[in-house]
Image (cartoon, rainbow, N blue to C red):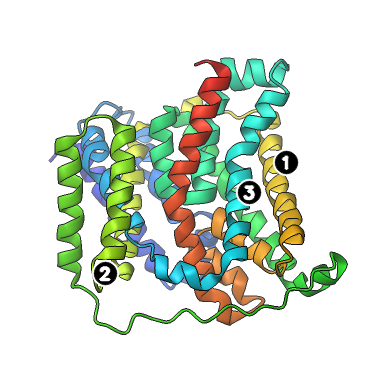
């Protein structure tokens, strides 16, 4: 076993047990530094202090061939269409509007200011536009989409870490802001003259016994194996794996959604630990203008969703719920929802899973539009 494998395995085990620890100090740390970021930084620190370069180790090709595809199919297989129907048409439309703004606004901004020094020198020549698709993936799909889009956009490791750090801080601040917004949603309804008081139907738990985890795992492995044998282009593989995940989860009886979601979460930590071996700290720097754009971008997302909620006449509590399902993910979306109505927490989880299932595709649209605009 190579040293790169040893470092990666050490990181995975350390992060997993630290994240599960009930120590209050560690709990505060993981509130601000998520496990995926720590898993990325630890291997980089080890490589830096021992002055060893693992960027060309064979572990990276193994990750791209097997681990990333397995994470994609696992996460996609955690989405249930039957649960999605219960949420209702308007909240889902509001959620999609939020996703669309995240994916499309950077391209609209670049097109509007195409001749500016910011876009020409920073975004195009310095390549900072390649940091935007992973953020789209993070804000809509979570870590899995973020990792896939990093590969598709060919984002450098140094830029990727900068994006991770800024994104982590911004999302934590945004979560606090959304907590305050959802608590004031009734007053905001009155201010915007929104009359919707619809209470969504409860999402029922699966009463049948789920498939054993080893059968689910076997089907996921088989799907990845077939895709790897039959397809060669990475983008096509991503699409095929996503479709396979949706098919098995919605057409195989008694699918074990819970295991698929937990397994996907573990695989994300594995991928990040391996990616961290490529990181070089000496290349870190991010212009303040780019950070300012990220802040402006997320507020445009929020304002657009408020306007959509007004147009749809849907309860404004759904704005922070849908925003956190996009930006925050499966952990923070139900937490924010609980500050308003605990009975809506399962609905927030389903929206967050929908976010995980669609983030990669939104990011692929962002990349395509950027490449067409910049002719790269």
Mark 2 and mark 3 in contact (Cβ < 8 Å)? no
How far is disc 1 from disc 2 in space, using C-alphas?
41 Å
Q: Earlier in the sequence, mark 1 or mark 3?
A: 3
Find residue 127 and report its image quarter.
Answer: top right
Circle 2 SS class? loop
Which of pointers 1 and 3 indicates the residue nearer the eye? 1
Which of pointers 1 and 2 indicates the residue nearer the eye? 2
Which of pointers 3 and 2 indicates the residue nearer the eye? 2
Image location (x, y in percent) of residue 181: 74, 65
Image location (x, y in percent) of residue 312: 71, 61
Q: Residue at x 44, y 29 (%)?
A: 153
Q: Is residue 200 visible?
A: yes
Q: Residue at x 45, y 42 (%)?
A: 361
Q: Residue furthest bottom?
A: 207
Q: Pointer 2: what residue?
A: 255
Q: Earlier in the sequence, mark 1 or mark 2?
A: 2
Q: Pointer 1: what residue?
A: 296
Q: Pointer 3: what residue?
A: 170
Q: Which disc, if any, is residue 324?
A: none
């Amino acid at each position: 076993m190579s040293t790169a494998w040893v470092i990666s395995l050490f990181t995975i085990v350390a992060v997993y047990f630290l994240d599960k620890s009930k120590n209050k100090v560690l709990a505060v740390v993981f509130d601000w530094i998520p496990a995926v970021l720590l898993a990325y930084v630890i291997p980089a620190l080890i490589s830096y202090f021992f002055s060893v370069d693992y960027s060309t180790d064979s572990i990276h090709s193994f990750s791209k061939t097997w681990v990333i595809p397995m994470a994609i199919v696992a996460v996609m297989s955690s989405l249930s269409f039957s649960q999605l129907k219960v949420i209702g048409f308007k909240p889902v439309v509001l959620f999609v509007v939020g996703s669309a703004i995240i994916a499309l606004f950077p391209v609209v901004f670049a097109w509007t200011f195409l001749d500016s020094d910011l876009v020409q020198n920073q975004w195009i020549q310095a390549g900072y536009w390649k940091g935007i698709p992973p953020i789209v993936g993070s804000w809509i799909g979570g870590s899995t989409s973020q990792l896939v889009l990093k590969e598709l956009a060919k984002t450098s490791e140094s830029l990727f870490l900068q994006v991770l750090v800024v994104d982590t801080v911004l999302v934590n601040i945004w979560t606090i802001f959304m907590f305050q917004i959802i608590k004031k949603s009734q007053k905001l309804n009155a201010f915007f003259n929104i009359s919707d008081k619809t209470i969504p139907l409860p999402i029922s738990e699966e009463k049948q016994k789920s498939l054993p985890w080893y059968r689910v795992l076997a089907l996921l492995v088989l799907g990845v194996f077939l895709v790897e044998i039959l397809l060669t282009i990475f983008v096509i593989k991503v699409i095929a794996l996503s479709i396979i995940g949706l098919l098995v989860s919605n057409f195989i009886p008694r699918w074990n959604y819970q295991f698929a979601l937990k397994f996907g979460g573990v695989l994300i930590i594995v991928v990040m630990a391996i990616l961290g071996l490529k990181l070089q700290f000496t290349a870190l720097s991010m212009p303040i203008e780019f950070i300012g754009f990220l802040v402006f971008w997320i507020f445009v997302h929020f304002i657009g969703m408020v306007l959509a909620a007004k147009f749809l006449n849907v309860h404004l509590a759904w704005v922070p719920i849908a925003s956190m399902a996009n930006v925050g993910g499966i952990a923070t979306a139900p937490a924010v929802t609980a500050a308003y109505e605990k009975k809506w927490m399962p609905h927030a989880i389903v929206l967050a899973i929908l976010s995980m299932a669609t983030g990669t595709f939104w990011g692929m649209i962002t990349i395509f539009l950027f490449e067409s605009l910049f002719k790269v």
